[in-house]
Image (spheres, rainbow, N blue to C red):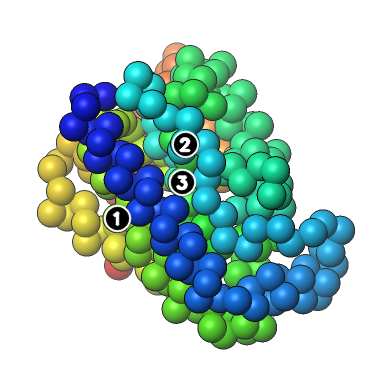
């Protein structure tokens, strides 16, 4: 990374941290709402420690870091919100991604990727963000605002790192989906961005429940390497997703 791009990244990282603080102050009862959500969902076997999660792994990135992929997950889950972690994709899906990236792409997931989310607001499971809004309506505008910010942050990071983008999770990227605001903003931004950024934007099924692995196995062509299949499938998915609106 050049000094200029690293300086830009540091500003982006600081802005993200500041936004986390502002959103947290703007939702003072979010932890209580999440406790209620967890109880209603039968998932109250953990403590709500960080309702809105900054990714501390971003603080490990230095000018010498070689970021090959920016990975975009959905939102922080149980392990990600633990006070002692506050890092994205450290649960089961993250471990599956880590193994795949090393084995098939020769990429050290913890050192050569930068992970962000479509929103930093925690829920036990992503789909439960809908129920959270019913319990705590004040969260709705901030969930949407955070999606717009994270979409903008993605393009800025891609420019800094000159990296490919791996968007994980397709089911909620639709007009009525949880992340429709994120996708709409992303489309708006990439429409006016340099073509090279769009060309390195790839969409995939989530690693959870073997969804990504099953899709890769089904669509991979004979004699096609995993890396070749990933780029082709990710491009095909991008065409579909970006044409939905």
Residue tagged 1: 152
Marks 3 and 1 close (CB-CB < 8 Å): no
Compared with 84, 26 (above or below) is: below
Question: How many other residues sit within 10 Å of disc 3, few (<14), some (14-19) or many (≥20)?
Answer: many
Q: Nearer the viewer, residue 108 or 7?
A: 7
**The residue tagged with tag 1: helix, strand or loop?**
helix
Instruction: Give the quadrant of residue 166.
Output: top left
* Residue 93: image location, x then y, percent: 64, 40
Q: CA distance from mark 2 to mark 3?
A: 13 Å
* Residue 18: image location, x then y, percent: 41, 58
Q: Earlier in the sequence, mark 1 or mark 2?
A: 2
Instruction: Tell me, for residue 59, which label it has, or none.
Output: 2
**Residue 219 visible (yes or no):** no
Q: CA distance from mark 3 to mark 1?
A: 12 Å
Compared with 164, 204 (above or below) is: below
Which residue shows up at 82% across the image and 63% down it? 43
Location of the N terminus by quadrant is: top left
Q: Nearer the viewer, residue 174 or 71?
A: 71
Which residue shows up at 62% across the image and 82% down it? 136
Residue tagged 3: 116
Question: How many other residues sit within 10 Å of disc 2, few (<14), some (14-19) or many (≥20)?
Answer: few
Question: How many other residues sit within 10 Å of disc 1, few (<14), some (14-19) or many (≥20)?
Answer: some
* Residue 120: image location, x then y, percent: 52, 57
Task: Locate residue 206 relative to residue 177 in the image: left or right.
Answer: right
């Amino acid at each position: 990374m050049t000094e200029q791009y690293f300086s830009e990244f540091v500003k982006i990282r600081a802005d993200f941290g500041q936004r986390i603080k502002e959103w947290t102050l703007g939702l003072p009862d979010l932890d209580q709402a999440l406790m209620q959500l967890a109880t209603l969902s039968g998932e109250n076997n953990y403590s709500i420690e960080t309702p809105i999660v900054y990714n501390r792994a971003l603080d490990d990135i230095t000018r010498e870091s070689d970021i090959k992929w920016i990975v975009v997950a959905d939102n922080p889950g149980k392990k990600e919100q633990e006070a002692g972690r506050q890092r994205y994709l450290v649960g089961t899906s993250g471990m599956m991604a880590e193994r795949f990236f090393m084995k098939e792409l020769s990429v050290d997931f913890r050192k050569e990727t930068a992970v962000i989310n479509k929103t930093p607001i925690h829920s036990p499971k992503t789909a439960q963000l809908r129920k959270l809004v019913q319990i705590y309506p004040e969260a709705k505008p901030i969930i949407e605002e955070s999606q717009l910010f994270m979409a903008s942050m993605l393009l800025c990071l891609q420019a800094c790192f000159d990296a490919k983008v791996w968007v994980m999770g397709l089911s909620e990227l639709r007009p009525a989906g949880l992340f429709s605001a994120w996708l709409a903003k992303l489309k708006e931004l990439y429409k006016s961005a340099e073509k090279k950024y769009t060309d390195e934007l790839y969409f995939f099924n989530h690693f959870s429940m073997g969804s990504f692995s099953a899709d890769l196995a089904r669509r991979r062509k004979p004699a096609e390497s995993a890396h070749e299949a990933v780029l082709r499938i990710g491009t095909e998915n991008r065409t579909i997703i970006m044409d939905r609106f």
